[in-house]
Amino acid sequence: MKYILCRPRGGLNDTLCEIGRCHKYAVKTGRKLIVDTSKSGLHDGFWKYFLPASDAFHSERHPDFDALSTYPKSVEGRVTSYVARYDPGIQNYVNETFALLRIDENVDYEEDLLVHEQCWYGEFMSLETVANIKFRPGVAKAILERLSSMNWYDAIHIRNTDYKTDYKEYFKEIYNSVCGRTLLVCSDDYQAIEFAKAFFDQTRVVRLSKFADNEGKPLHGEKTINQFETNMDMFTDLIGLVLAENLYILPVENNTRFSGFSSLAVSIKQRPDIVRGLLGWNQRLDERFDFLAVLADLRKASALG
């Protein structure tokens, strides 16, 4: 058996992109994909939240990494102990000898183990991951239970910590569109959420995440006291954005691009088949999503399994 060890870095979309890149390679070359998200923005085990829906994933006990022939050669025999660091020159991760910890997807390597430790670069690959995983039943049920009280709603995502947005001006643009409706506000910036509550005075503003004032620091930057709760907030926000009737997203970096989390939500929203797969919901997704029906089905599945 040959393996590829994916150790993604960065936030959720970066993490999913790198897993997707490695999954595509594993399928092409017949390798088993081992996912280690302990150094990613999740700061936790990937399979604590998900189940594999692809035979390429190896989610069980992994082999002795240090006993396997390894690429890159500089980490062979010390896969469990090498130290990776971010190189700003190439904008990605290298080890102590400055060897790039990245596979070339066009090469079929001879080594038993390939190590890929990177943050996102190049092609948008997160859908490759989410199309081949699903939430654990208990996780899916908890997410939908938190969303079910809102019935029909709009949603907005605001990235405003490491990347900035002009959300105050954007709020003015959508004020009339959301007036009298329920608006789910998802953001990494506590102050932006509080401002939305005050600004949209004719709108029911809802916040589902529970984090306190983070003083402008990215939520995925450091491990929290209750990382499971932090990640559940993030997944709930993501699915909340996906299932909204109308989804609003703001560009970052002087209006030059959208954040990875925003782009991920939009991409999943456009794929009802992926939404069904992630939630373990096998019925047809109608134009108006029936939260209560989905929740009842997931509770039944959870009780059986």
Image (cartoon, grey):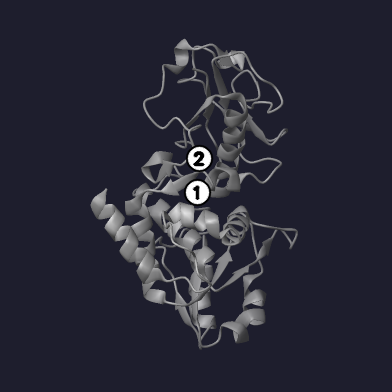
Q: Visible in this render: residue 239? A: yes
Residue 82: percent from left, percent from top? 51, 20
Task: Report if the CB atoms under discs 2 and 1 are less than 8 Å apart.
Answer: yes
Q: Which disc, if any, is residue 38?
A: none
**Residue positioned most to the left:** 303
Q: For the point 50% across and 59% down, which residue is it? A: 238
User: Which amino acid, by three-letter code, is at mark 1?
Assistant: His
Residue 122: percent from left, percent from top? 71, 41
Query: As displayed, is residue 110 above or below residue 253?
Result: above
Q: Which disc, if any, is residue 220?
A: 1
Q: Earlier in the sequence, mark 2 or mark 1?
A: 2
User: Which amino acid, by three-letter code, is at mark 2?
Assistant: Ser
- Mark 2 highlights which residue? 40
Query: As displayed, is residue 173 above or below residue 261?
Result: below
Question: Is residue 122 or residue 214 the one in the foreground?
Answer: 122
Question: Is residue 218 or residue 241 the one in the foreground?
Answer: 241
Q: Visible in this render: residue 45? A: no
Helix, strand or loop at label 1? It is loop
